[in-house]
Amino acid sequence: MANKRVLVKFSGEALAGEAGHGIDTKILKYIAQEIKSLVDAGIEVGIVIGGGNIIRGVTAAHDGIIKRTSGDYMGMLATVINGVAMQEACEHAGLQVRMQTAIKMEQIAEPYINRRAVRHLEKGRVVIFAAGTGNPFFTTDTAATLRAVEIGAEVIIKATKVDGVYDKDPEKFSDAVKLSELTYEQALKDDIKVMDDTSIALAKDNKLPIIVCDMSKKGNLLDILNGNRENCSIVQ
């Protein structure tokens, strides 16, 4: 096993399923089983989930009624809702889970404390990091990269609906070309939307590889961490 500790980033929209909003418990169950396969293989797993299935800060603030800062805090709370759901699904699958939030809410989760998070991981517990970075104007992509660096993850996996990075949207363009490998500089220069620019720059500064893969392919996460890079793209 090449990677001992990883952070997996899921989008909030991934939890919504075909409905496009809310939480689909079938998808929760599926993701929990995929995470369990990693833990059973001896991998320490951290998770960050977006909140786009409930609300996005930018969207909430688009017409000026809600300030961007308030919209972003609303988005952070949405990630906590998703985190609670994921915690329940993982515990139902037999995993030990702890959720830590960047905004204090002790009745729901532990506050984010780096040393405590690392101890949880060392004990085989899955750690869910919610509420983003705790600051407005930062995405959950950036929060995922930040937490990955802080906990010493060897790689960050962005689990999406496509099997990697393309030079243009494969759902809109039939001639889109998959990029199996690319550099941080290429992703930034060509504005290839692997993650947002802040998160890519942070990954670059800390030499943290970013793997983009299709979360709907069963067993894909474990295959990738076992060295099979056919169904993914890697930025490093």
Image (spheres, helix red, strand yellow):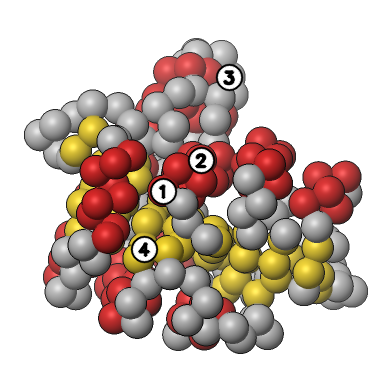
Secondary structure beneath label 4 = strand
Badge 4: how crowded within 10 Å, few (<14), some, or many (20+)? Answer: many
Left/right of residue 31 with respect to residue 85 in the rendered view: right
Q: Indicate the quadrant containing the C terminus: top left, top right, bottom left or bottom right.
A: bottom right
Q: Amino acid at mark 1?
A: Ile
Secondary structure beneath label 2 = helix
Q: Residue at x 18, y 40 (%)?
A: 109
Q: Which residue is mark 1?
A: 151
Badge 3: how crowded within 10 Å, few (<14), some, or many (20+)? Answer: few
Q: Is residue 132 above or below residue 230?
A: above
Left/right of residue 195 with respect to residue 10 in the rendered view: right
Q: Amino acid at mark 2?
A: Leu
Percent coordinates x, y for residue 24 in the rendering: 32, 64
Determine which of the numbered discs, if any, sits on residue 146 in the image.
Answer: 2
Secondary structure beneath label 3 = loop
Q: Give the camera-side residue of 235 and 195.
A: 235
Q: CA distance from mark 1 to mark 3?
A: 38 Å
- For residue 138, which quarter of the picture? top right
Q: Amino acid at mark 4?
A: Val
Q: Residue at x 33, y 39 (%)?
A: 114
Secondary structure beneath label 1 = helix
Determine which of the numbered discs, if any, sits on residue 45 in the image.
Answer: 4
Q: Which residue is mark 3?
A: 63
Q: Amino acid at mark 3?
A: Asp
Q: Is residue 223 above or below residue 138?
A: below
* Disc number lying in front (4 or 1): 1
